[in-house]
Amino acid sequence: MAAMARLNVGVLGLSHDHVWGNLAALHDGERGRLVAAAEPDPALRNRLRALDGGVAVHDSFDALLERRDLDAVFVFSDNRASAEFAERALGRGIPVMIEKPMAADLRGARALRAAAQKAGVVLMVNWPTAWRPALRHGLTLARDKALTKKILSYHRVRVPRFAVFPPNRKVEPSKRLRYPLIVKSVSDEGSVGISQASVVRDDEKLKERVAFIHDSIGTAAIVEQYIEGRELYVGILGNQALQAMPVWELFFTNMPDGAKRIATDRVKWSVKYQKKYGIDSGPAIDLPEAAAGEIQHLCKRAFRALELSGYARIDLRLDEAGKIWVLEANPNPQIAKGEDFAASAEKAGLSYDAVLQRIINLGMRWQPESFA
């Protein structure tokens, strides 16, 4: 196979400290080369010239944006102006990596996303921790529910049977799967695309829902055995020595007859819907101590099997027969004050400040060879 040509990269702005590390990584890598930069500060221009005399250095951003030889642009200018320059580059059809924050406000962020979608090019936000191996590993698992289930199944952790249906392929119902089934995006998070209609009971509805995921979400669909039961969550803290938080439960106290008790998009994000149907979360009720211990132990097994680190949340179902099923592992759960992870940690005697400090300490102590 022929080697891929190196990309010609331009950089808009040199005022952000992170630019120098990124340019060093670009220089040492094999996929791109810096061909041009733009920076109004003469001292910063001279600093770049001293590092790489072969780079064309412009004193205006317009001069760089007018070039026709760029395959991608890095934006490391002043935070107040970076979104404007990134949007202009996207408007010219140039892929962009912009240093955090991507914009000064939500309107600016949405404008950038819209510009990238209109141009059909990549927009990437550079967040230094995003490149750390532990986080990349965790997010790979989070974005591939099928891979997570395969690994857990190999380690004899009970997961629902499943099948994956990629886009642009005929949907052939699997004989291994029995209705009812639940249809989700194989990679999207936050219950995107999940509604009451996600639970299907026949081939026709299955095909309709898989098509919905393909057309509306734009990903492959994962079809799982639907497990009727209680929705449980367990937060985990640690690298090697793990601490499982108290078992948390999602309560559905006022759902209409026939509605499935599942964490749909509206269940997660609509406060109005939550109030109307009495949806809340808290310590699991009427759960024998032995059962709680078994669930916590299972979640530690799942955490280790997936080689997670720092913190995570394991999502489970407890069926009517008392069997525990692991649905997903979230290596990047919501940790805001009052949310499930922090609330369950507080129940275990950890203040919010202590939880955040533990997470920071665990990240600083993590070593990749720990999983060798």
Image (cartoon, rainbow, N blue to C red):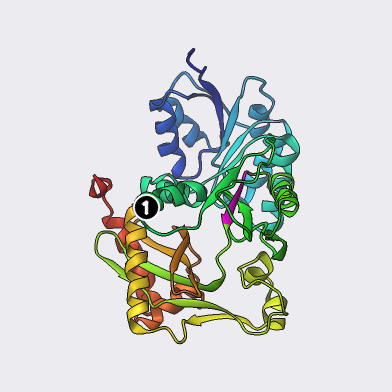
Q: At x 57% / y 70%, what residue is drawn?
A: 228
Whether residue 45 sits left or right of residue 346 in the image: it is right
- Residue 371 lies, with reference to residue 27, above or below; the image says below
Amino acid type, label 1: Leu
Closest to the observer, 276 or 136: 276
State the image coordinates of residue 127 (x, y, percent, origin top left).
Answer: 48, 49
State the image coordinates of residue 335 (x, y, percent, origin top left).
Answer: 47, 68
Question: Label 1 belongs to which residue?
Answer: 306
Q: At x 61% / y 24%, what residue is drawn?
A: 70
Question: Could you tell me if residue 332 is visible in this image?
Answer: no
Corner quadrant of residue 189: bottom right
State the image coordinates of residue 224 (x, y, percent, origin top left).
Answer: 57, 55
Dot 1 falls on a residue whose secondary structure is loop
Give the residues in magenta.
220-224
Count of all numbered marks drawn on residues in the image: 1
Q: Residue furthest bottom?
A: 286
Closest to the observer, 163 or 167: 163
Does 221 appear in magenta?
Answer: yes
Whether residue 219 sits left or right of residue 47 in the image: it is right
Question: Could you tell me if residue 212 is visible in this image?
Answer: yes
Q: At x 41% / y 69%, what residue is drawn?
A: 235
Q: Residue furthest top?
A: 2
Does 10 appear in magenta?
Answer: no
Closest to the observer, 69 or 224: 224
